[in-house]
Image (cartoon, rainbow, N blue to C red):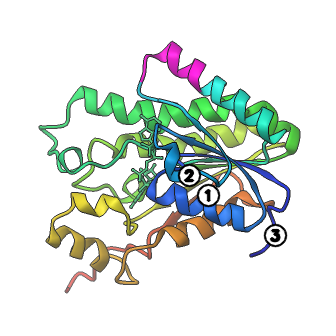
Amino acid sequence: MSGRFEGKSVVITGASGDIGRVVARAFAADGARLGLVARNNAAAIAGLGTAVTCELLAPADRVRAGVEAARDTLLTALGGCDALILLAGLPATPALWNKSLEEVSAQDLHDAFAVDTVGTFLFAQAFAGALRKSHGSIVVTSSSAAFYGDVLGLAYAPAKSANAGLVKMLARVLAPEVRVNGIAPGGIDTGWLHSLSDADKAHASAQTLLRRLGTPEEIAQAILDLAAPGYANGQVLQLDGGVFPPKSDS
Ligand SMILES: NC(=O)c1ccc[n+]([C@@H]2O[C@H](COP(=O)([O-])OP(=O)(O)OC[C@H]3O[C@@H](n4cnc5c(N)ncnc54)[C@H](OP(=O)(O)O)[C@@H]3O)[C@@H](O)[C@H]2O)c1
Protein backbone atom coordinates (compact mmCIF):
# COMPACT_ATOMS: atom_id res chain seq x y z
CA MET A 1 0.00 0.00 0.00
CA SER A 2 1.35 3.42 -0.95
CA GLY A 3 -0.28 5.49 1.80
CA ARG A 4 -1.03 8.17 -0.82
CA PHE A 5 -4.56 8.49 0.57
CA GLU A 6 -3.66 8.46 4.26
CA GLY A 7 -6.08 10.86 5.96
CA LYS A 8 -7.75 11.78 2.64
CA SER A 9 -11.49 11.69 2.04
CA VAL A 10 -12.66 9.76 -1.00
CA VAL A 11 -16.26 9.55 -2.29
CA ILE A 12 -17.19 6.63 -4.56
CA THR A 13 -20.48 6.23 -6.47
CA GLY A 14 -21.44 2.74 -7.64
CA ALA A 15 -19.49 1.61 -4.57
CA SER A 16 -21.68 -1.46 -4.04
CA GLY A 17 -20.97 -2.83 -7.53
CA ASP A 18 -18.51 -5.55 -8.51
CA ILE A 19 -15.79 -3.03 -9.34
CA GLY A 20 -16.89 -0.42 -6.76
CA ARG A 21 -16.48 -2.79 -3.79
CA VAL A 22 -12.89 -3.61 -4.80
CA VAL A 23 -12.10 0.06 -5.46
CA ALA A 24 -13.48 0.98 -2.03
CA ARG A 25 -11.35 -1.66 -0.32
CA ALA A 26 -8.25 -0.49 -2.20
CA PHE A 27 -8.73 3.13 -1.09
CA ALA A 28 -9.41 1.98 2.48
CA ALA A 29 -6.21 -0.11 2.45
CA ASP A 30 -4.37 3.02 1.31
CA GLY A 31 -5.60 4.96 4.33
CA ALA A 32 -8.59 6.84 2.88
CA ARG A 33 -11.74 7.69 4.76
CA LEU A 34 -14.64 6.70 2.54
CA GLY A 35 -18.00 8.12 1.53
CA LEU A 36 -19.84 5.43 -0.40
CA VAL A 37 -22.88 5.78 -2.63
CA ALA A 38 -25.11 2.88 -3.72
CA ARG A 39 -28.47 2.77 -5.41
CA ASN A 40 -29.91 0.61 -2.62
CA ASN A 41 -27.43 -2.17 -1.81
CA ALA A 42 -25.68 -0.34 1.04
CA ALA A 43 -25.30 -3.71 2.83
CA ALA A 44 -22.61 -4.65 0.27
CA ILE A 45 -20.35 -1.89 1.57
CA ALA A 46 -21.24 -1.95 5.26
CA GLY A 47 -18.32 -1.17 7.55
CA LEU A 48 -16.11 0.33 4.82
CA GLY A 49 -17.12 3.94 5.39
CA THR A 50 -20.11 6.26 5.53
CA ALA A 51 -22.70 4.79 3.16
CA VAL A 52 -25.65 6.57 1.56
CA THR A 53 -28.15 5.59 -1.11
CA CYS A 54 -29.04 7.67 -4.14
CA GLU A 55 -31.42 6.67 -6.95
CA LEU A 56 -30.33 8.15 -10.28
CA LEU A 57 -33.28 6.74 -12.28
CA ALA A 58 -35.82 9.30 -11.13
CA PRO A 59 -37.40 12.54 -12.37
CA ALA A 60 -34.82 15.31 -12.88
CA ASP A 61 -35.75 17.51 -9.90
CA ARG A 62 -35.74 14.53 -7.53
CA VAL A 63 -32.40 13.26 -8.82
CA ARG A 64 -30.71 16.59 -8.20
CA ALA A 65 -32.17 16.77 -4.68
CA GLY A 66 -31.03 13.20 -4.00
CA VAL A 67 -27.48 13.89 -5.20
CA GLU A 68 -27.28 17.05 -3.10
CA ALA A 69 -28.61 15.22 -0.04
CA ALA A 70 -25.97 12.50 -0.52
CA ARG A 71 -23.29 15.19 -0.91
CA ASP A 72 -24.40 17.00 2.26
CA THR A 73 -24.41 13.81 4.35
CA LEU A 74 -20.99 12.71 3.07
CA LEU A 75 -19.29 16.10 3.42
CA THR A 76 -20.61 16.41 6.96
CA ALA A 77 -19.28 12.94 7.82
CA LEU A 78 -15.92 13.30 6.06
CA GLY A 79 -15.29 17.03 6.51
CA GLY A 80 -14.32 17.42 2.83
CA CYS A 81 -13.57 15.51 -0.35
CA ASP A 82 -10.14 14.91 -1.90
CA ALA A 83 -11.19 12.51 -4.64
CA LEU A 84 -14.50 11.67 -6.32
CA ILE A 85 -14.72 8.30 -8.10
CA LEU A 86 -17.77 8.02 -10.36
CA LEU A 87 -18.54 4.36 -11.05
CA ALA A 88 -22.36 4.22 -10.92
CA GLY A 89 -23.72 2.64 -14.07
CA LEU A 90 -26.92 1.01 -15.30
CA PRO A 91 -26.45 -2.72 -14.55
CA ALA A 92 -25.58 -4.79 -17.63
CA THR A 93 -28.45 -7.27 -17.59
CA PRO A 94 -28.35 -9.98 -20.30
CA ALA A 95 -31.69 -8.81 -21.77
CA LEU A 96 -30.46 -5.25 -22.23
CA TRP A 97 -26.85 -6.08 -23.13
CA ASN A 98 -27.87 -8.31 -26.02
CA LYS A 99 -30.43 -6.01 -27.66
CA SER A 100 -29.89 -5.48 -31.39
CA LEU A 101 -29.93 -2.05 -33.04
CA GLU A 102 -33.60 -2.58 -33.86
CA GLU A 103 -34.49 -3.61 -30.30
CA VAL A 104 -32.87 -0.76 -28.31
CA SER A 105 -35.64 1.60 -27.18
CA ALA A 106 -35.59 5.30 -26.42
CA GLN A 107 -36.28 4.35 -22.78
CA ASP A 108 -33.17 2.12 -22.70
CA LEU A 109 -31.05 5.03 -23.92
CA HIS A 110 -32.67 7.47 -21.48
CA ASP A 111 -32.01 5.06 -18.60
CA ALA A 112 -28.34 4.60 -19.49
CA PHE A 113 -27.80 8.34 -19.90
CA ALA A 114 -29.70 9.06 -16.66
CA VAL A 115 -27.50 6.79 -14.54
CA ASP A 116 -24.13 6.87 -16.34
CA THR A 117 -23.91 10.39 -17.76
CA VAL A 118 -26.40 12.64 -15.96
CA GLY A 119 -25.53 10.95 -12.66
CA THR A 120 -21.81 11.47 -13.29
CA PHE A 121 -22.38 15.12 -14.22
CA LEU A 122 -24.59 15.86 -11.20
CA PHE A 123 -22.16 14.28 -8.71
CA ALA A 124 -19.24 16.20 -10.24
CA GLN A 125 -21.29 19.39 -10.06
CA ALA A 126 -22.36 18.76 -6.45
CA PHE A 127 -18.79 18.08 -5.24
CA ALA A 128 -17.08 20.78 -7.34
CA GLY A 129 -16.89 23.26 -4.45
CA ALA A 130 -15.36 20.75 -2.03
CA LEU A 131 -12.90 19.51 -4.68
CA ARG A 132 -11.81 23.06 -5.59
CA LYS A 133 -11.14 23.68 -1.90
CA SER A 134 -9.05 20.50 -1.52
CA HIS A 135 -7.37 20.76 -4.97
CA GLY A 136 -8.67 17.25 -5.47
CA SER A 137 -9.46 15.04 -8.43
CA ILE A 138 -12.26 13.21 -10.21
CA VAL A 139 -12.23 9.86 -12.03
CA VAL A 140 -15.10 9.31 -14.52
CA THR A 141 -16.03 5.87 -15.89
CA SER A 142 -16.21 5.39 -19.65
CA SER A 143 -15.81 2.10 -21.54
CA SER A 144 -13.69 0.59 -24.29
CA ALA A 145 -16.86 0.69 -26.44
CA ALA A 146 -16.42 4.48 -26.63
CA PHE A 147 -13.15 3.93 -28.51
CA TYR A 148 -13.69 0.75 -30.58
CA GLY A 149 -17.45 0.49 -30.87
CA ASP A 150 -19.17 -2.82 -30.14
CA VAL A 151 -21.99 -4.93 -31.52
CA LEU A 152 -23.26 -5.70 -27.99
CA GLY A 153 -24.13 -3.28 -25.19
CA LEU A 154 -25.61 -0.83 -27.72
CA ALA A 155 -27.93 0.62 -25.10
CA TYR A 156 -24.99 1.56 -22.85
CA ALA A 157 -22.23 2.62 -25.25
CA PRO A 158 -23.62 6.06 -26.20
CA ALA A 159 -23.65 7.13 -22.53
CA LYS A 160 -20.12 5.79 -22.00
CA SER A 161 -18.99 7.70 -25.10
CA ALA A 162 -20.53 10.86 -23.66
CA ASN A 163 -18.57 10.24 -20.46
CA ALA A 164 -15.28 10.27 -22.39
CA GLY A 165 -16.23 13.75 -23.64
CA LEU A 166 -17.40 14.79 -20.19
CA VAL A 167 -13.87 14.20 -18.88
CA LYS A 168 -12.59 16.97 -21.17
CA MET A 169 -15.44 19.35 -20.25
CA LEU A 170 -15.03 18.86 -16.53
CA ALA A 171 -11.23 19.13 -16.75
CA ARG A 172 -11.59 22.52 -18.43
CA VAL A 173 -14.25 24.02 -16.20
CA LEU A 174 -12.64 22.80 -12.96
CA ALA A 175 -9.06 23.81 -13.87
CA PRO A 176 -6.68 24.65 -12.40
CA GLU A 177 -7.76 23.44 -8.97
CA VAL A 178 -9.25 20.05 -9.84
CA ARG A 179 -7.81 17.34 -12.11
CA VAL A 180 -10.33 15.21 -14.00
CA ASN A 181 -9.47 11.93 -15.70
CA GLY A 182 -11.41 8.93 -16.93
CA ILE A 183 -11.03 5.20 -17.09
CA ALA A 184 -12.36 3.12 -20.00
CA PRO A 185 -12.31 -0.52 -18.92
CA GLY A 186 -12.47 -3.29 -21.48
CA GLY A 187 -13.91 -6.66 -20.42
CA ILE A 188 -13.53 -7.04 -16.67
CA ASP A 189 -14.16 -10.30 -14.81
CA THR A 190 -17.41 -9.28 -13.09
CA GLY A 191 -21.13 -10.14 -13.05
CA TRP A 192 -21.47 -8.58 -16.51
CA LEU A 193 -20.08 -11.86 -17.90
CA HIS A 194 -23.47 -13.47 -17.22
CA SER A 195 -24.73 -11.38 -20.16
CA LEU A 196 -22.43 -13.18 -22.58
CA SER A 197 -22.68 -16.47 -24.43
CA ASP A 198 -19.68 -18.80 -24.09
CA ALA A 199 -18.53 -17.74 -27.57
CA ASP A 200 -18.74 -14.03 -26.70
CA LYS A 201 -16.89 -14.66 -23.42
CA ALA A 202 -14.10 -16.39 -25.32
CA HIS A 203 -14.01 -13.53 -27.84
CA ALA A 204 -13.80 -10.90 -25.07
CA SER A 205 -10.59 -12.52 -23.82
CA ALA A 206 -9.15 -13.47 -27.21
CA GLN A 207 -9.44 -9.96 -28.67
CA THR A 208 -6.95 -8.58 -26.10
CA LEU A 209 -3.20 -8.79 -26.63
CA LEU A 210 -3.00 -10.29 -23.11
CA ARG A 211 -5.61 -12.94 -24.04
CA ARG A 212 -7.55 -12.46 -20.83
CA LEU A 213 -10.14 -10.28 -19.14
CA GLY A 214 -9.08 -7.66 -16.63
CA THR A 215 -9.74 -7.90 -12.91
CA PRO A 216 -11.50 -5.41 -10.64
CA GLU A 217 -8.21 -5.17 -8.71
CA GLU A 218 -6.43 -3.94 -11.85
CA ILE A 219 -9.14 -1.32 -12.39
CA ALA A 220 -8.81 -0.26 -8.74
CA GLN A 221 -5.03 0.12 -9.04
CA ALA A 222 -5.44 2.39 -12.09
CA ILE A 223 -8.17 4.45 -10.44
CA LEU A 224 -5.97 5.07 -7.39
CA ASP A 225 -3.13 6.15 -9.70
CA LEU A 226 -5.41 8.56 -11.61
CA ALA A 227 -6.93 9.97 -8.42
CA ALA A 228 -3.59 10.53 -6.67
CA PRO A 229 -1.79 13.87 -7.15
CA GLY A 230 0.05 13.99 -10.48
CA TYR A 231 0.25 15.66 -13.90
CA ALA A 232 -2.37 13.60 -15.79
CA ASN A 233 -5.41 15.74 -16.59
CA GLY A 234 -8.29 15.47 -19.06
CA GLN A 235 -7.19 11.97 -20.11
CA VAL A 236 -9.17 8.75 -20.47
CA LEU A 237 -7.10 5.67 -19.72
CA GLN A 238 -8.10 2.68 -21.86
CA LEU A 239 -7.52 -0.27 -19.54
CA ASP A 240 -8.37 -3.21 -21.77
CA GLY A 241 -5.36 -5.48 -22.06
CA GLY A 242 -4.52 -3.97 -25.44
CA VAL A 243 -7.14 -4.24 -28.19
CA PHE A 244 -5.81 -3.83 -31.75
CA PRO A 245 -7.15 -4.80 -35.16
CA PRO A 246 -6.20 -8.44 -35.97
CA LYS A 247 -3.46 -9.03 -38.55
CA SER A 248 -5.01 -8.94 -42.01
CA ASP A 249 -3.95 -12.55 -42.74
CA SER A 250 -5.27 -13.99 -39.43
N1 LIG B 1 -17.57 -4.76 -15.57
C1 LIG B 1 -17.05 -4.41 -16.75
O1 LIG B 1 -16.52 -5.24 -17.51
C2 LIG B 1 -17.09 -2.97 -17.17
C3 LIG B 1 -16.52 -2.59 -18.40
C4 LIG B 1 -16.57 -1.26 -18.79
C5 LIG B 1 -17.17 -0.32 -17.98
N2 LIG B 1 -17.75 -0.72 -16.79
C6 LIG B 1 -18.39 0.30 -15.96
O2 LIG B 1 -17.77 0.30 -14.67
C7 LIG B 1 -18.75 0.67 -13.68
C8 LIG B 1 -18.81 -0.40 -12.61
O3 LIG B 1 -19.10 -1.64 -13.23
P1 LIG B 1 -19.56 -2.92 -12.36
O4 LIG B 1 -19.29 -4.12 -13.18
O5 LIG B 1 -19.03 -2.83 -10.97
O6 LIG B 1 -21.15 -2.66 -12.33
P2 LIG B 1 -22.25 -3.26 -11.30
O7 LIG B 1 -21.71 -4.40 -10.53
O8 LIG B 1 -23.49 -3.45 -12.10
O9 LIG B 1 -22.48 -2.04 -10.26
C9 LIG B 1 -23.26 -0.94 -10.65
C10 LIG B 1 -23.22 0.09 -9.53
O10 LIG B 1 -24.02 1.23 -9.93
C11 LIG B 1 -25.10 1.40 -9.00
N3 LIG B 1 -26.33 1.74 -9.72
C12 LIG B 1 -26.98 0.97 -10.62
N4 LIG B 1 -28.12 1.58 -11.01
C13 LIG B 1 -28.19 2.75 -10.30
C14 LIG B 1 -29.16 3.79 -10.22
N5 LIG B 1 -30.31 3.73 -10.93
N6 LIG B 1 -28.92 4.83 -9.39
C15 LIG B 1 -27.79 4.87 -8.65
N7 LIG B 1 -26.82 3.93 -8.67
C16 LIG B 1 -27.04 2.86 -9.49
C17 LIG B 1 -25.27 0.06 -8.29
O11 LIG B 1 -25.87 0.25 -6.99
P3 LIG B 1 -26.66 -1.00 -6.26
O12 LIG B 1 -25.62 -2.08 -6.05
O13 LIG B 1 -27.14 -0.43 -4.95
O14 LIG B 1 -27.75 -1.42 -7.19
C18 LIG B 1 -23.82 -0.42 -8.22
O15 LIG B 1 -23.16 0.19 -7.13
C19 LIG B 1 -20.07 0.85 -14.43
O16 LIG B 1 -20.23 2.21 -14.75
C20 LIG B 1 -19.86 0.02 -15.69
O17 LIG B 1 -20.67 0.42 -16.77
C21 LIG B 1 -17.70 -2.01 -16.38
Q: Secondary structure at mark 3?
A: loop
The reply to whether the residue tagged 1 has its Cβ within 8 angstroms of ligand 1 is no
The amino acid on which the numbered mark 2 sits, given as a three-letter code, is: Ile
x and y, in percent, of residue 186 in the image: 41, 64
Residue at the (50%, 52%) spot, across then down = 44
The x and y percentages for residue 242 are 43, 75
- Magenta residues (range): 58-66
Q: In the image, which disc is placed on residue 11? A: none
Q: Secondary structure at mark 2?
A: helix
Residue 80 location, x and y as percent? 82, 40
Q: Amino acid at mark 3?
A: Gly
Residue pictured at 55% horizontal, 37% vertical: 120
Which numbered disc flags the more N-terminal residue, 1 or 3?
3
Identify the image quadrant of the N terminus: bottom right
In the image, is residue 225 part of the stretch drawn in magenta? no
- Tag on residue 45? 2
Question: Can you identify the residue that label 1 sits on?
Answer: 24
Q: From the viewer's perspective, is residue 217 above or below residue 12? A: below
How far, Cα to Cα, is label 1 from label 3? 14 Å
Residue 86 image offset from top left, x and y in percent: 58, 46
Residue matched to label 3: 3
Please say if the residues under marks 1 and 2 sit with CB atoms less than 8 Å apart. Answer: yes
Judge: label 3 CB < 8 Å from ligand 1. Answer: no
In the rendered view, tell whether residue 72 sits above or below residue 194. Answer: above
